[in-house]
Structure formats: C-alpha cells, structure tokens
C-alpha cells in the first residue's frame, strides 16, 4: 500500500517457474468493497488455476487487466484504494500499469528456478530454493505430489526466509527408487537437503505423508529443527481413504485419475486438465508405479493407516513449536485427527480451515502461509 | 561315407526320411477323400534334402521353409501328431488349427514355419542368423527354398545381405525341376542355381538330392563354415518331387520322370542299399523303423480325425500379444 | 519444467535410453550410421535426417547399416525379433513400403495368429511420412491407413516431442510389431521432454484442446494445423475440441465417441488421401456409434485423391492448411436441419 492508501494488486507468482498468468474471471467489479481474504479473481497459469485473494481492505477502484490476456508476474492488475483518492491519480497509475501489460512478457532470460540435486542415502534428491535471507524453511510434499505442490506458498514465504521445496524419492525429478519405502528412508532425503543447504536450524513444513516424514526427520535430529508445520499429516489415527491411496497408485488413464484427484480438494473445479496431465506424465515415468506401490504399503495396513507419528511427536517433547493445519472437508484423512495431534503435543497450535479439503496449502494459500509464518515466529 | 556316421545317426536319418515319406504318402491318400481342407504341397521324393541338412543341426539352429514344408518340419523335430492335426485344421494342431499346412511352425524347435509366400523365408533367416551372431550362440540358420523361390527378389537380396553382414546362414535351393508348372530349366537363367553363389559372394555347391550321404556331407561343410564365422553357403539340391505342385495338380506338364525316379533314384531305397551293403545297419533295423513309422502315422491320422475343431472364440484370439 | 528437445532429439534419446537399458535392442537401416565401408568418417549421417546420430559409437555393434535391400533387412529385423532381439529397423520413407511389404503384412503381422499364439515378434519399424518438403510423389505419402488396415500390426503417429519419446519407448517395449510414423516436417519441432524414461500407452488419444462446439479428430502434423485453425475459429466464437489420436491401431474409440457425444459435431483432419483412410474410418465409427449425438453431417479435411505434386504451388494446395480446416468446420458448426 502506498502512502496515499492505494494498493496495487499484482499478478502473483505461483511456483518458481511461473512467468505469466491469465485472469479467467473477475470476481469483483469496480466499486466493490473488499476485505482481506475476499476473492478478487480466478487466475490460470501453465500449471494450475487458483483464486487470488485480497490481503488488505478497501474499495476496488480500477480493474486493469482484462479476462484472457497474458499478464507478466508482478504486473499490476487492479487498484484498491479508499473512495477519497482522486480519479486522476488512479487513471495515471492505471495507464502506466496498462502499458506494462501491453509491453508483453519480458524476454526469457533462461534463468528459471535453479533445481539442485543432492545424494542422500545413495539417492538423487531434487530441490529448488527461493529467497536469500532469513531462516531456512523446507517444504515436504505428500504421496504422489512434488515440490510444485507448494507453488502458492514458496515465493510469498521467500520474501522473508530461505525457502526450499524438495521432491521426495519416487517423486518429481528425484530418483524413483524408494528402497523399502519407509518413512525413515524418506526422512534421509529431508536431512540430506538440510545438509546440502548448510542448515543446522530449519523450519520443516510437511503435507500428509510428508508430515510424517518431517516428524521422523525431526525425531532423528531434534537439535536441527526449529519448528514444524504439519498440513493434514499422516500417522495420527487409523482412518484414511485407502481407496484413494491404492487407486492413485493403480490408475493408468486420465479417466481413472481425474475423479481420484478430485477427492483431494473440497472444490473439484481446482482439478484442471493441466493438473491431471502433469500427474499422468509423472505416473508414466519409469519406476513410479513401483515407488507408489511401495509407499502405499508404507501408508496402509489393510484399509487403515500403518504409520504411527505420535511416537515421533512425543520424542520431540515440548521444545519445538508445532502447528497442525487441517481442512474441515478433508476426504483423505479426516480432520478430527487434528485433535489426536494436540493430544500427544499439548503445546501444538491447531488450525482447522473451514471448507478446505486435503490440500489446504493449495486451497487456502493465504491461511496456509499465515500458519507457517506464525509457527516460525513462535520459534523465535 | 556311411562310416563317418554313427549307428544312431544312421537310424535317425532313415527314420526321418521314412517318416516324411509315409507322412506325405498318407496325406496324399487322405486328401483324395476330400476331408483335408485347403491346399497341401507334398515333399515326397525330396526327403534326403531335409534329413541330410537337418541331421547337421541342433537346438541352437533355425530353419525356414516353403509351402512344401512338411519334410522340413519333420526333419527339424516338429511333432508329427501335431502336424497332422494342423493339416486337418484341428485345435490340437501345431498351430491350434489357425495356420494349416502352409504355416506349420514350432519356434521351440527352431522351425520358423512353412511359408505361403515364395521367397518369404530367406529374409527371416538373415534375421535369426543375425540374432545368433550377436548373441554369440554359435547357431546357424537355414533357408530352404525352391527353384521358383530362387528367382524371387527377396532370396537374392537375402543372399547379398548374408554375405555383406557375414551371417551364419545357409541357403538351400531345392531344385525339383518345376516351379508350379514351369520348368526350372526355363525360369532360371543360369544352368544351375548354384552358379549364382559367386555373384553374391559365397561358395556354391551342387548336390544329388536323392543321395542322403552327399547331402549330409555338403551340409556338414556349410554348417561348419557358418559356425566358424566363414559366412553363408548356397547348396543346390537336384532331384524330383513325386507328387504335383499341390494335391489336385494333374501334372500334365511333366514327362514320366516320377516312375523312373521311384524305381531307380529313390533316396530311401538307395540309403537302405548302402547301409545294408556296408553292414552299418541291418535289414531288420530298417524294418523295425518302417514298422514304428507306420504305427506313428496311423496314430497321427486317427487322432487328427477325432480331434475337436477350434472353438468359435478362437477366431479372435492371438492377433496380438496384448492390444 | 523439463528441458526442451526437438522431435528428432526426443527420438534419439528414446533409442539411446532403451539401448542402454536393454542389450537386446538393436538399430538397423540404410545409413542409420552412414559411411559404412567408406574411407571417411564413421556415423557420417546417423540416419538421413539425423535421428540415429551418435548411437553407432555409443553402442558398438548394435547399429547396423544395410544395403538398399528393404525386403532383406526388414525381413531380417522381423526374423531377429522372433529369435530374441528387439530390432528397431528403419524404412527410410514409407513410400518404399512396396519393396518390403510382404515381410511386414504377411509375415510379422501374421506369425502370432498363424502359429497358434506361439510367436512373439517385438519389432519396431520406424518410417518417415508426409508432404511439405517438395520431395514429390514417391517420397511424401502418408500411408498409415494401409498399415492400420492389417490385423496384427500396431500403428503409431506421434505429434510432439513429448509423445515421440514416450511412444517410441513404449513401441520398443511392446511385444507386437509396431510401425512408427514420423512426419518429416516435425523433426525440428521443439517441446518439453522429461529427461527420465517414460512410456505412453497405445490406444490413448490426447485431447490437446478442450472445446464444446465441434470435435476435430486428427493426428501427426495435422494436430498443429488443427490447433491453429481452432485458434482462428475461437475468435469467431466456435469452440473446438481437438483430439490427437496418437495411435491408429489400437484406436482410442472411447475418447473420440465421448467428445462427439459432447459436441455433436465432428470434423476429421488427416493428411492422407481420402479413400479407405483414417478420415473415413473415424467418420464411420462416429456415424455408427454416436449417431444419436450427431447434430450435423461429419466433415472430412484430407489431401485430394492425387499423388503428391512437386511444385510448391501445388504441394501447398495438396496439404490441408488451417484455412481449409476453418472452412470445413464453420458449416458443420452452423448446420441446422
């Protein structure tokens, strides 16, 4: 926000490789009042579609970008300001913003996100980082995901921290061999990346299976871990959608995969063609079938959860701040397990996000980001 | 020559030729009843070629044949009962009734099939020879073809390729004097098919196809050359077929050479005469084989006639390994 | 984001990765290395348009040049396949199929069936197709309909570098004879290709563009032409769904029919000549299995029933372009009883 109270809403950067986005729908119109968290626009990128939320209050005074045009990341797409800001000022700003959009995408300097690799436990692990100051934050995705699962969070967090996201073994561009597929083997990868970035004090963020993995890593190396933010973590109760886990491993076609992926979200509209295509392309890489089958056995004992994360939490004691975030509409691991986490970690903060599914870090990125920042702050 | 072969080998040779002869004579008879579907092309008279060549081969080796393939199948060890059932189109046949006389094959025995396309075999044999060479098995591959097939472009290309790639291949031209109804003396531009060998960079040899021992010796040399990395050979057998091009062929194009051949040149008669003369085998040995073969053929025919036809669902199976 | 490769490089990488993984994979064809027997450089060409470059030195003894004897070496590839190798043979231009077709359609295609299910013939025959290079009538045809017609063969026609690598790896691993069609004008096309090995299944079409008004079914180079036409049509308010067949045998009937059920209107775009073609094949499928959903006659955009002409002025007319597709789609979109 400028001194005059004008907020320039910019095309967000979702994911390290995003260079431009397209507004598919303006949810607000000029003249609408907005409060923080209100939906502003639906935006489509190469990788995903998402909804941009307002982060400050005001009146929508100008919509600059039009539906369907390519807008470079960072370019102003709307102006929010109090009613007393003169039109002339806004027209001037809008005209200049319009010129930036009309100038088109800057030349691709080829400098996309730098993907590093490290040998951890004899396996190649890929990771990518953003941000050059502050504490190290390491983001760990879940079963069948990859480092791009954090695309709504990584850049915003990078404003104040060094934020890394890795591909677990069997996922993304990491080696696809998962050995015995155990949580400990996956935790090797987490610790390996911390070694590679030279961190002796890191904040770990884990989703689903990744939540169990960061807990295991923390239990092995508690001195190194500053805080834990767990999004719908595995291992806190018997209930899990075994049908989802096994179905995802077994699916061979888009027809089979689409409805499964839909179960991850409260709003199935988030599952675009690109999301399914990318998952299908991942599943067709050599070795992925075997990896997912092994990991399914790690996750499941019959139709129930096999992992016991409570032991890792107890081992950590009260030293490390823990936050657990869960979507109330999670169809994969039920949100009531959040209270099981609290039961073994009485100091843990619990945030249930109303109406989100199993992917709150994608469905409610602003709240997810706030939860991570708040946990980091508690670590002091 | 008989004394370079062991007693077992001589018995095997005789049994092979006798089995082929009785098989073909019996199919000739049964075909006339109208019970055998489609076309059959009989090998009777040519037995020494198949037997003499194949006695030099083992399980590493592959052969490809022609539409006149029963003899080669038997000599390479394809099950006789299965062959007969295949000819009758039964589900118990070597190819489950899906191939018939012209497509009998058994890859487990290195028999890449009879072939309904004249000249279809030689390119395939270049392939199996290449595989043997690259895998280092020491195996050789033999392409049998007729005087008709010797003029087919595929045969000529294959001979060139086998020399250029130095393949362990043997090309056996079975010149029985006729390609269908056309005399080989007319259709083959050179006096002998073997004359072409030099043009394709390989040695060529002409053999009396009625003489088992001559065939065996020529083949032995060619097989040794191939196994030792010396490349391909062309062997031309000269003989006669006793029956028509196909069963039903009136053979009005022929002179009376069959009667003469059966009487004076027949490979089985000559073999028997030679081995009994030099004492390698006795008349009793040969008679025992004759008896066993007769029983074998009778059994094969009886079982074939009684065997079930393929089920309607078999029409659609085995087009692909997985579609 | 995977790095960009050209279609040619994607094919080369597929071959290299499979040859690395499986020692039974061999490559053969005319000038697949080049320079054989000549005093100059070995691997001089790496294939007439460079697809096999570098493999000769990387995999000694497994890249074989051949004399110009298609029936012999295509037949040899087929025979070697029955004997435990996995040959990738190149029929340089599909227009040359005439000199080796027997080995392909009477031998390889039929072994499994004729021999009662006992033969396995895992041969891949790569071949170039398509017009646009002024190569004239005997070097420019799109003959995949002829191979599609033969039971026992599989026919693959990739349109992008990503598809080319995944489908070629799948073809090499497939245990049936596969004829793999590469449009000669696509070799320089770039696109994202993962570094790791991966496969794409046969019989799965790709909906490359979603739409609601008209379904365009197409393949190979025509996928790109159809997408360009779809852009133009979108500007005039016609929303096209573009379906890339990827393989004609097996054929993904479900995706085609599902799309036609949604849009009710179908135009097939195929560079091949029109009689007994993919265009007529898809049209018949839709007419017989989606009749109730159709709201307009089916349109077909194909080459004319002529050989491919030499002169640029004529060849450019011969090949379906975006304008012809637009002109064919509009009446189908607008058709009312």
Image (cartoon, helix red, strand yellow):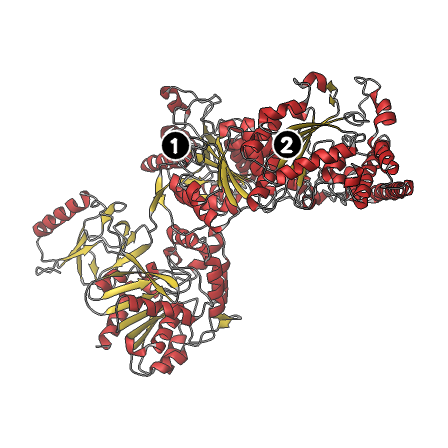
Q: How would you rate the neighbour count of disc 2 (Cα within 10 Å): few for under 14, some for 14-19, many for 20 or more?
A: many
The spot of residue A29 in percent (x, y) is 22, 53
Residue A321, quarter of picture? bottom left
Disc 1 target residue? C40
Labels 1 and 2 within one chain: no
Whether residue C202 can be seen here: no
Instruction: Pick whichever, B211 or C29, lies toward us.
Output: B211
Tag 1 subunit: C
Query: Would you say residue A280 is visible in this rendering?
Result: yes
Residue A223, label in figure: none
Residue A224 found in image quarter: bottom left
What residue sits 86% from the left and 36% below the top? B272
Badge 1: residue crowd in 10 Å (few <14, some 14–19, many ≥20): few
Using residue A377 as the reference point, say whether residue C128 is left or right of it. Answer: right
Expressed as whole percent of the image width and height from the top left, the position of residue B137 reads 60, 46
Q: Chain of mark 2?
A: B
Q: Tell me the residue at 18%/43% (across/down).
A: A102
For the residues bearing labels 1 and 2, Cβ distance under 8 angstroms: no
Return the x and y of residue A187 as percentages of the image width and height: 38, 70
Image location (x, y in percent) of residue C263: 45, 41
**B253 left or right of C163 in image:** right
Q: Which mark is residue B233?
A: 2
How many numbered circles are shown? 2
Look at the picture and state if B288 lies above or below A199: above
Secondary structure of residue under mark 1? loop
Q: Secondary structure at mark 2?
A: strand
Tell me the distance, in whole angstroms, between the alpha carbons under discs 1 and 2: 31 Å
Residue B136 relative to residue C320: left or right: right
**Whether residue A191 is situated above or below residue C317 in the rendered picture:** below
Note whether B157 is above or below B12 in the view shown: above
């Amino acid at each position: 926000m400028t001194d005059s109270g004008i907020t320039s809403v910019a095309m967000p950067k979702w994911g390290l490789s995003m260079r431009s986005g397209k507004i598919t729908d303006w949810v607000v119109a000029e003249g609408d009042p907005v409060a923080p968290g209100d939906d502003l626009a639906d935006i489509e990128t190469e990788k995903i579609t998402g909804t941009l939320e307002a982060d400050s209050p005001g009146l929508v005074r100008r919509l600059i970008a039009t539906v369907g045009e390519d807008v470079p990341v960072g370019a102003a797409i709307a102006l929010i300001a109090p009613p007393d800001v003169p039109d002339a000022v806004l027209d001037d700003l809008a005209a200049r913003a319009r010129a930036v959009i009309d100038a088109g995408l800057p030349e691709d300097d080829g400098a996309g996100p730098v993907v590093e690799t490290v040998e951890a436990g004899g396996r190649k692990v890929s990771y990518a980082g953003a941000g050059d100051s502050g504490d190290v934050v390491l983001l760990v995705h879940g079963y069948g995901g990859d480092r791009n699962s954090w695309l709504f969070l990584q850049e915003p967090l990078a404003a104040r921290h060094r934020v890394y996201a890795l591909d677990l073994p069997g996922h993304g561009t990491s080696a696809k061999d998962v050995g015995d597929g155990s949580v400990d083997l996956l935790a090797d990868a987490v610790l390996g990346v911390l070694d590679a970035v030279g961190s002796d004090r890191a904040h770990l963020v884990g989703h689903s299976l990744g939540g169990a993995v960061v807990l295991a890593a923390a239990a092995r190396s508690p001195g190194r871990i500053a805080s834990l933010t767990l999004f719908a973590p595995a291992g806190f109760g018997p209930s899990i959608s075994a049908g989802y886990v096994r179905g995802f491993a077994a699916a061979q076609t888009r027809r089979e995969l689409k409805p499964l992926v839909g179960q991850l979200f409260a709003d199935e509209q988030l599952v675009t063609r690109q999301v399914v295509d990318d998952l299908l392309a991942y599943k067709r890489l050599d070795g992925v079938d075997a990896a997912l089958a092994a990991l399914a056995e790690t996750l499941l004992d019959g139709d129930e959860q096999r992992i016991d994360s409570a032991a890792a939490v107890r081992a950590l004691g009260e030293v490390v701040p823990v936050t657990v975030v869960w979507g109330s509409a999670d169809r994969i691991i039920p949100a009531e397990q959040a209270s099981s986490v609290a039961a073994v970690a009485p100091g843990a903060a619990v945030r249930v996000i109303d109406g989100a599914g199993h992917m709150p870090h994608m469905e409610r990125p602003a709240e997810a980001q706030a939860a991570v920042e708040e946990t980091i702050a508690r670590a002091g | 020559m008989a004394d370079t072969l062991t007693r077992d080998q001589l018995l095997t040779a005789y049994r092979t030729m006798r089995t082929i002869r009785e098989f073909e004579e019996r199919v000739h008879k049964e075909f006339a009843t109208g019970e055998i579907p489609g076309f059959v092309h009989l090998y009777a008279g040519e037995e020494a070629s198949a037997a003499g060549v194949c006695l030099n081969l083992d399980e590493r080796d592959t052969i490809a044949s022609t539409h006149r393939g029963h003899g080669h199948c038997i000599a390479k060890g394809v099950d006789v009962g299965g062959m007969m059932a295949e000819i009758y189109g039964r589900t118990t046949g070597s190819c489950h009734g899906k191939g018939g006389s012209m497509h009998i094959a058994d890859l487990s025995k290195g028999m890449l099939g009879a072939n309904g396309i004249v000249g279809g075999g030689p390119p395939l044999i270049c392939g199996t020879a290449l595989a043997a060479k690259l895998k280092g098995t020491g195996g050789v591959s033999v392409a049998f073809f007729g005087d008709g097939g010797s003029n087919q472009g595929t045969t000529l290309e294959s001979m060139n390729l086998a020399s250029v790639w130095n393949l362990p291949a043997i090309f056996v031209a079975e010149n029985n004097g006729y390609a269908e109804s056309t005399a080989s003396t007319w259709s083959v531009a050179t006096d002998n098919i073997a004359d072409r060998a030099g043009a394709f960079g390989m040695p060529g040899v002409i053999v009396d196809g009625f003489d088992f021992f001559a065939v065996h010796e020529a083949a032995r040399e060619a097989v040794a050359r191939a196994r030792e990395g010396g490349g391909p050979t062309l062997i031309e057998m000269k003989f006669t077929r006793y029956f028509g091009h196909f069963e039903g062929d009136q053979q009005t194009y022929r002179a009376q050479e069959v009667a003469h051949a059966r009487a004076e040149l027949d490979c089985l008669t000559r073999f028997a005469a030679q081995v009994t003369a030099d004492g390698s085998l006795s008349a009793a040995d040969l008679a025992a084989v004759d008896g066993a073969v007769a029983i074998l053929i009778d059994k094969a025919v009886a079982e074939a006639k009684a065997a079930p036809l393929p089920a309607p669902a078999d029409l659609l199976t085995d087009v692909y390994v997985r579609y | 984001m995977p790095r960009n490769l050209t279609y040619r490089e994607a094919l080369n990488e597929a071959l290299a990765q499979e040859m690395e993984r499986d020692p039974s994979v061999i490559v053969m064809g005319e000038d697949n290395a080049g320079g054989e027997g000549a005093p100059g450089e070995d691997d001089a060409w790496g294939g007439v348009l460079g697809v096999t470059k570098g493999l000769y030195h990387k995999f000694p003894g497994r890249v074989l040049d051949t004399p110009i004897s298609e029936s012999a070496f295509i037949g040899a590839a087929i025979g070697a396949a029955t004997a435990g190798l996995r040959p990738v043979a190149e029929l340089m231009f599909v227009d040359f199929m005439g000199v080796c077709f027997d080995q392909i359609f009477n031998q390889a295609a039929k072994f499994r069936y004729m021999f009662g299910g006992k033969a396995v013939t895992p041969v891949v025959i790569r071949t170039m197709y398509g017009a646009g290079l002024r190569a004239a009538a005997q070097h420019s045809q799109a003959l995949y309909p002829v191979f599609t017609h033969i039971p026992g063969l599989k026919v693959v026609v990739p349109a992008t570098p990503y598809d080319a690598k995944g489908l070629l790896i799948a073809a090499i691993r497939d245990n049936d004879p596969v004829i793999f069609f590469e449009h000669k004008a696509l070799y320089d096309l770039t696109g994202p290709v993962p570094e790791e090995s991966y496969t794409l299944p046969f019989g799965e079409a790709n909906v490359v563009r979603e739409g609601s008004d008209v379904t365009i079914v197409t393949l190979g180079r025509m996928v790109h032409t159809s997408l360009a036409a779809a852009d133009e049509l979108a500007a005039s308010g016609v929303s096209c769904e573009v379906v890339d067949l990827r393989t004609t045998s097996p054929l993904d009937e479900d995706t085609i029919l599902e799309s036609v059920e949604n849009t009710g209107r179908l135009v097939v775009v195929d560079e091949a000549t029109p009689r007994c073609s993919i265009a007529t094949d898809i049209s018949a499928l839709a007419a017989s299995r989606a009749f109730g959903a159709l709201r307009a006659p089916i349109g077909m955009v194909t080459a004319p029933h002529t050989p491919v002409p030499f002169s640029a002025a004529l060849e450019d007319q011969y090949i379906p372009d975006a304008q012809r597709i637009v002109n064919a789609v509009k009446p189908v979109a607008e058709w009312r009883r």
